[in-house]
């Protein structure tokens, strides 16, 4: 992991907050399968961490919660970035022993494992290849979805999985949206991201030449509606800006585009995804 992509002057994803239907069941999954630690807990919410101090993921069980809605905007997956390939290797071994159904891909820039939590919230756990190995052409980074060499990954190391390493972070978030053109204007002109890869029906955006901090797709259908507030899925996510001044400038840009930003610097993208602008 190269920390330069997740510190000043980049803008990157901070904490992600999601709804679940059974907090106790979810907490068991996120602690025992993923290896998170509890930072803070109440009867209907919990904040999870890897290092004991930095929130990465928070879970909520809202009143009258309903199951995940199909064909809506919202969370496709959030992605946990492990520090090393050896960490991903030990996590893969642990996942296999735990009987978790997995998908796996080689994206050229990274190696990734995919699965769902008990409510169907999408999760990616991945490791980055060194940025010196990424291939850029005219401002676009080469990414693909190829089969992962699982045997090679398993052979990377023999250390046991003892939970999320302290340097684990939230690497990126991938969202279902309703319209790519509107979404691109919002994230590029409003939030200051750059589109670094385009797939059929999808855009990938970053700052500071990362392969992507945000993925955006219309795979649930152009014009998809936002989920209801008490359904399983995304409540909000943070974008961490390099300074308070950068947040103020971003709010000003959004206002000039006719986008309403709340007093707590919370904004909603054109697909209904809620973003908190922090520094």
Image: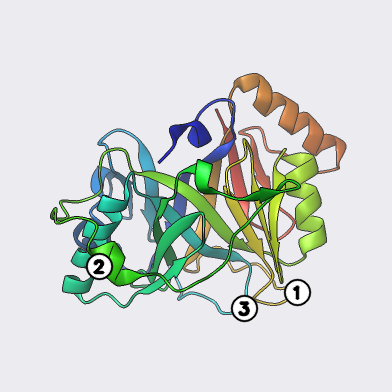
Task: Answer with left or right where residue 258 lies relative to residue 46.
Answer: right
Q: Earlier in the sequence, mark 1 or mark 2?
A: 2
Quarter occupied by the N terminus: top left
Are the two marked residues, 3 and 2, in contact with CB atoms closer than 8 angstroms?
no
Eyeballing the image, is 87 above or below 154? Answer: above
- CA separation in Å, label 3 and label 2: 25 Å
At horizontal 77% and vertical 62% (from top left) the residue drawn is 180
Mark 2 — residue? 25
Q: Which of marks 3 and 2 is nearer the N terminus?
A: 2
Q: Which of labels 3 and 2 is toward the front?
A: 3
Q: How crowded is mark 2: few (under 14 residues within 10 Å), some or many (20 or more)?
A: few
At horizontal 36% and vertical 70% (from top left) the residue drawn is 149
- CA separation in Å, label 1 and label 3: 10 Å
Mark 1 — residue? 222
Location of residue 88 in the rendering, given as x and y in whole percent from the top left corner:
30, 56
Tag 2, which secondary structure? helix
At horizontal 41% and vertical 62% (from top left) the residue drawn is 112
Q: Which mark is residue 275?
A: none
- CA separation in Å, label 1 and label 2: 34 Å
Q: Which of labels 1 and 2 is toward the front?
A: 1
Q: Residue 71 carries which label?
A: 3
Are the two marked residues, 1 and 2, in contact with CB atoms closer than 8 angstroms?
no
State the colouring used for the structure image. rainbow
Q: Residues within 10 Å of mark 1 (few under 14, many from 20)?
A: some
| Residue 257 visible here | yes
Q: Which of 70 and 168 is in front in this view?
A: 168
At horizontal 68% and vertical 38% (from top left) the residue drawn is 262
């Amino acid at each position: 992991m190269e920390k330069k992509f997740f510190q000043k002057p980049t803008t990157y994803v901070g904490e992600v907050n999601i709804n679940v239907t059974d907090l106790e069941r979810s907490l068991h999954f996120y602690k025992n399968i993923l290896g998170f630690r509890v930072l803070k807990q109440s009867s209907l919410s919990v904040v999870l961490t890897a290092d004991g101090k930095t929130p990465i993921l928070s879970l909520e069980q809202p009143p009258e919660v309903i199951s995940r809605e199909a064909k809506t905007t919202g969370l496709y997956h959030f992605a946990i970035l492990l520090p090393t390939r050896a960490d991903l290797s030990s996590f893969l071994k642990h996942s296999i022993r735990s009987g978790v159904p997995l998908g796996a891909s080689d994206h050229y820039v990274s190696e990734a494992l995919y699965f769902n939590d008990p409510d169907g919230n999408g999760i990616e756990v991945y490791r980055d290849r060194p940025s010196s190995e990424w291939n850029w052409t005219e401002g676009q980074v080469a990414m693909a979805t190829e089969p992962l060499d699982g045997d090679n990954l398993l052979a990377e190391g023999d250390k046991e999985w003892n939970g999320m390493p302290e340097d684990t972070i939230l690497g990126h978030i991938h969202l279902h949206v309703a319209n790519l053109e509107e979404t691109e204007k919002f994230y590029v002109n409003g939030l200051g991201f750059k589109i670094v890869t385009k797939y059929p029906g999808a855009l990938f955006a970053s700052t500071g030449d990362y392969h992507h901090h945000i993925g955006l797709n219309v795979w649930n259908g152009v014009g998809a509606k936002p989920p209801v507030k008490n359904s399983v899925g995304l409540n909000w996510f943070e974008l961490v800006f390099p300074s308070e001044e950068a947040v103020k400038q971003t709010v000003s840009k959004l206002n000039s585009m006719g986008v309403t930003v709340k007093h707590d610097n919370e904004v909603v993208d054109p697909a209904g995804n809620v973003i908190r602008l922090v520094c």
